[in-house]
Amino acid sequence: MSAQPVKIDDLPIGRFHIKIAGLTFGAHFTDGYILGLIGIAFTLLSPQMHLDAFWQGLIGASALIGLFLGSLFFGWISDKVGRQKIFLASFVLITIASVMQFYVESAMSLFLCRVLIGIGLGGDFSVGHAMLAEFSPKKHRGVLLGSFSVIWTFGYVAATFVGTAMLSLGDDAWRWMLASSAIPAALILIARIGTPESPRWLVNQGRIAEARAIVKKHLGDNVELDETRTTQTRSG
C-alpha cells in the first residue's frame, strides 16, 4: 500500500531541511566572523598602513557596503538564472576575496577586497533566505529564518577568540586574521556542491518535471509540490 501524498509545506523537519538550514546558516556565521575580525586586525593594520580616521571608517564599513550592493544585484540575477547558481557563486567570490586580503599593500586594495566579500555575502543572504524558505515546511519556516541572528553572533564571537590568538604571529598577523575567513567560506562552498535548485523557482519557470524530480529525490516519493499555488504566488 503506497504512502498518502503529503504537501511540501506540511512535511516534518527532515535531514534535507537541516542540511539546507546548515548551509544557509554558514553564511551568517561567516559574516559575523568577517566583521568581527576587522576590529582586532585594525590594532596592527592601522599603524602599519598609517590609516587615518577616514580610511579606518571606510574599510570598517566596506563589507557592509558590498553586502548592500550584492543583495540588490544577486537577488535580481537569481530570479533570472536560479537560486542554486548564486548559492555557489557567492561563496566562490567570498573565498577568493578572503585570500586576496593576505596580499594587499594599500588601504584601497583592502577596501576593494572587503567590498567584494560583502557583495558575495549580500548575494548569498538574498538567495540563501529564499532557498531555505522555499524548501522549509510552513510550520517551521519562521523559526528557521529567525535563527540567523543567533548564528551571526557565534561567528562574531569566534572571530574574537581567533583574532586574539593570532595577535602573537607578528607584524603580518592581521593578514593571517583576515585571510582566515577563507577557511569557513571554502568549507561551506564545498558542502554546497550538489545542492539542488529550488523546486518552487523551477515551477515558476515552467520546469515542472524538474521540480517534481527534485522533490521526489530529496524529500520523498510521496511528497507533492503545490504547483498551482506556487505559480499564483509569483503572478500575484
Image: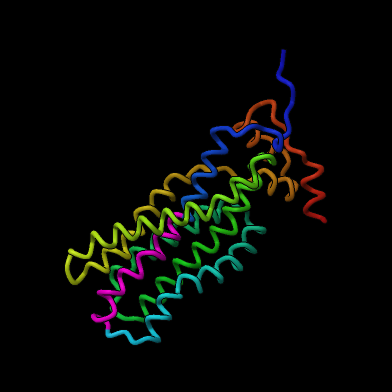
What residue range appears in magenta?
A: 29-49
> x%, y% of residue 123?
55, 62
**Residue sitting at x 42%, y 81%:** 57
Point out the image quarter for the N terminus: top right
Residue 230 is left or right of residue 35, and the answer is: right
Is the residue 145 above or below the residue 105 in the image? Answer: above
Most extreme residue toward the top, as rendered? 1
What type of secondary structure mainly makes up the magenta span? helix
Tell me, yes or no, whether the highlighted magenta stretch contains residue 130.
Answer: no
> x%, y% of residue 85?
55, 53
> x%, y% of residue 183?
34, 54
**Residue sitting at x 81%, y 55%:** 235
Residue 80 in which image quadrant: bottom right
The residue closer to the viewer here, 11 or 131, is 11
Residue 137 is left or right of residue 109, and the answer is: right
> x%, y% of residue 13?
60, 34
Tell me, yes or no, whether the highlighted magenta stretch contains residue 32.
Answer: yes
What colouring does the structure picture have?
rainbow
Point out the image quarter for the C terminus: bottom right
Is the residue 231 above or below the residue 152 in the image? Answer: above
Residue 212 is left or right of residue 26, and the answer is: right
Residue 183 is left or right of residue 93, and the answer is: left
